[in-house]
Image (tube, rainbow, N blue to C red):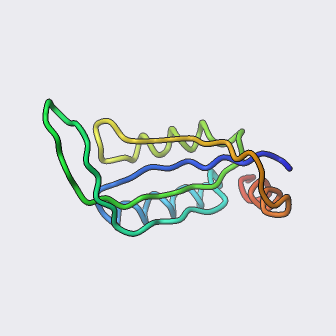
Amino acid sequence: MDQICVVTTVVDSRSVADLMAAAAVAGRLAACAQVGGQVDSTYWWRAGVETSTEWSVQFKTAPDRATALVAQIRSNHPYEVPEILVTHAESGDPAYATWVHENTRT
């Protein structure tokens, strides 16, 4: 199987999550993007514990597109320090991996 990457982030509004997902897919930086439902996040920020509601976004991409995708996410992200995680899938359906690679090409 050709390897694929899953890039994840969270944002503070559904509309921002939807825009980021659409921009990545339209730009062929991700083959698909999934916006997950609301999650409550608790974290340290500016010397205190904060809790907020966020929406998660998972992008599926080819390894050679991950750097550009991360750059796009970072440049459009509303947070000062965004969570952007890149995970390399160890295994999966070969047909899906092929589809991801084909749909991250211009």
Identify the residue at image location x=13%, y=36%. 48
How many labels sit on residues? 0
Where is residue 89 shown, x and y percent of the image?
70, 47
Find residue 92 and report its image quarter. bottom right
Q: Residue furthest top?
A: 47
In the depicted structure, whether residue 73 falls above or below residue 12: above
Relative placement, left or right, of 15 versus 67 is left
Relative placement, left or right, of 77 versus 61 is left
Where is residue 69 shown, x and y percent of the image?
57, 44
In the depicted structure, whether residue 17 falls above or below residue 89: below
Identify the residue at image location x=62%, y=50%. 29
Identify the residue at image location x=30%, y=62%. 13
Where is residue 11 shown, x and y percent of the image?
34, 54
Relative placement, left or right, of 46 versus 70 is left
**Which of 42 and 26 lies nearest the eye of the viewer?**
42
Where is residue 104 shown, x and y percent of the image?
71, 53
Find residue 81 and report its image quarter. top left
Identify the residue at image location x=30%, y=47%. 78
**Which of 98 and 76 lies nearest the eye of the viewer?**
98
**Which of 63 and 69 lies nearest the eye of the viewer?**
63
